[in-house]
Image: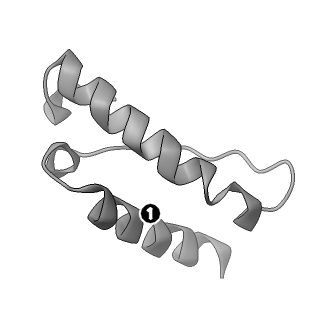
Amino acid sequence: MSKAVGNSVVRHRVSRRLRHLVRDRLDLLPPGTSLVVRALAPAADADSASLGRDLDAALHKVLR
């Protein structure tokens, strides 16, 4: 997680939210898949719903 996202408290909060969102979508990935999620600075101000939409859009691009 880049320091551009925010201070350590903000980075940790974003990391926890993303981990929770990814956990709900792991069954969409083929077995043995490695997934890297890179959070950009706007993720610090995004709510969980918009993070989820962005994650779904990224997964859709990768899995089609």
Q: Quadrant of residue 15?
A: top left
Colour setting:
one colour
- The amino acid beneath tag 1 is Leu
Depth check, front residue: 36 or 50:
50
Name the residue at the right extreme. Answer: 31
Q: With respect to residue 9, does 26 lie above or below?
A: below
Question: Where is 48 relative to 64, above or below?
Answer: above
Q: Secondary structure at mark 1?
A: helix
Name the residue rendered at 44%, 75% in the picture.
Answer: 57
Residue 53: x %, y % from top left: 38, 71
For this rendering, which residue is in front, 39 or 22? 22
Where is mark 1, residue-wise?
Answer: 55
- Residue 1 placement (x, y as % from top left): 34, 29
Q: What residue is at 22 percent from the left and 56 percent from the top?
A: 47
Sort mark 1 into few (<14), some (14-19) or many (20+) by Cα contacts within 10 Å: some
Left/right placement of residue 43 relative to residue 12 reads: left
In the image, taking residue 6 as reference, residue 61 lies left or right, namely right
Residue at (53, 76) in percent of width and height = 61
Q: Quadrant of residue 6?
A: top left
Residue 51: quarter of image: bottom left
Specify the quadrant that holds the C terminus.
Answer: bottom right
On screen, residue 25 above or below 17: below
